[in-house]
Image: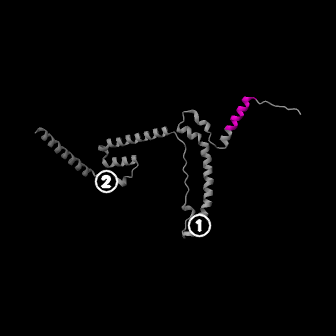
Amino acid sequence: MDFKTVEVPYQARQTKLDLDEKNIYRFGMGFNSAQMGDGNVTNVVIKSRYALLDLKCNKLEIRLKQFLRKILKVVLQEINDANGTDFQNKDVYFEFEREVMTNAQDNAHIELTDAQTRQTDVNTLLSLEATLGNELVVQGICEVLEIDYDDIKDKIPTDDLYDAEQSLNEVVTDEHSTERINSVAT
């Protein structure tokens, strides 16, 4: 018996191994955690690395919903028979909420930027109050802060009432100032 061995060069084996690993993740639609360790990982980089796994989850979600619909028929039939109700498949929906790992510092920076933008918008609207009027400014602020204007419009003073309150506040302030000046003088 004669043994023959063929030596495959190290570089060729390493290249083939890397190519096989890449193809496993690509065609298996998996997530390669070995890519995550480069130090500068932003939310965009993280999302792009999860893209294949996300596609795989889309396919799985469709199949899972089909399976759950089949089970739902049996469950609804049992509930309807037991309680005398008439629930249908269309009365039930399935909602899947995916959560992807993100960079907390990026998220905090995005939230800070959004808050600063809203603050700038509100300050701009407040500076235009003399031009636009109280009601339009409040409507604009409600849009910026995502508040329903119809819910709070009854709480907004009318311009006449607002002017009367301002005048009354000025008179009260002036009277207190005059009283303080008189008490200091005596």
Q: Position of residue 146 (x, y in %)?
A: 41, 49
| Vertical relation: 45 (above or below) 165 | above
Q: Residue lying furthest bottom in this view?
A: 84
Q: Residue lying furthest right in this view?
A: 1
Q: Which colour scheme is used?
A: one colour
Q: Where is residue 5 in the image (x, y as percent from the top left)?
A: 82, 31
Mark 2 or mark 1, which is nearer the start of the sequence? 1
Question: Does 12 lie within the magenta span?
Answer: yes
Residue at x-position 61% and y-position 46%: 55
Instruction: Report the side of 166 relative to 142 (left or right).
Output: left
Magenta: predominant secondary structure element? Answer: helix
Q: Residue lying furthest left in this view?
A: 186
Q: Mark 2 points at which residue?
A: 155
Instruction: Report the side of 21 relative to 115 (left or right).
Output: right
Residue at x-position 14% and y-position 43%: 179
Residue at x-position 67% and y-position 42%: 27
Residue at x-position 69% and y-position 36%: 19
Q: Give the range drawn in magenta.
A: 9-21
The residue type indicated by label 2 comes to Lys
Question: Does 20 lie within the magenta span?
Answer: yes
Element at label 1: helix
Disc 1 packing (10 Å; few <14; some 14–19; many ≥20): few
Image quarter hosting the C terminus: top left
Image quarter hosting the N terminus: top right
Q: Name the residue under label 1.
A: 78
Residue 114 position by quadrant: top left
The residue type indicated by label 1 comes to Glu
Q: How far apart are marks 1 and 2 (CA)?
A: 51 Å
Badge nearest the viewer, 1 or 2: 1
Q: Where is residue 164 in the image (x, y as percent from the top left)?
A: 22, 50
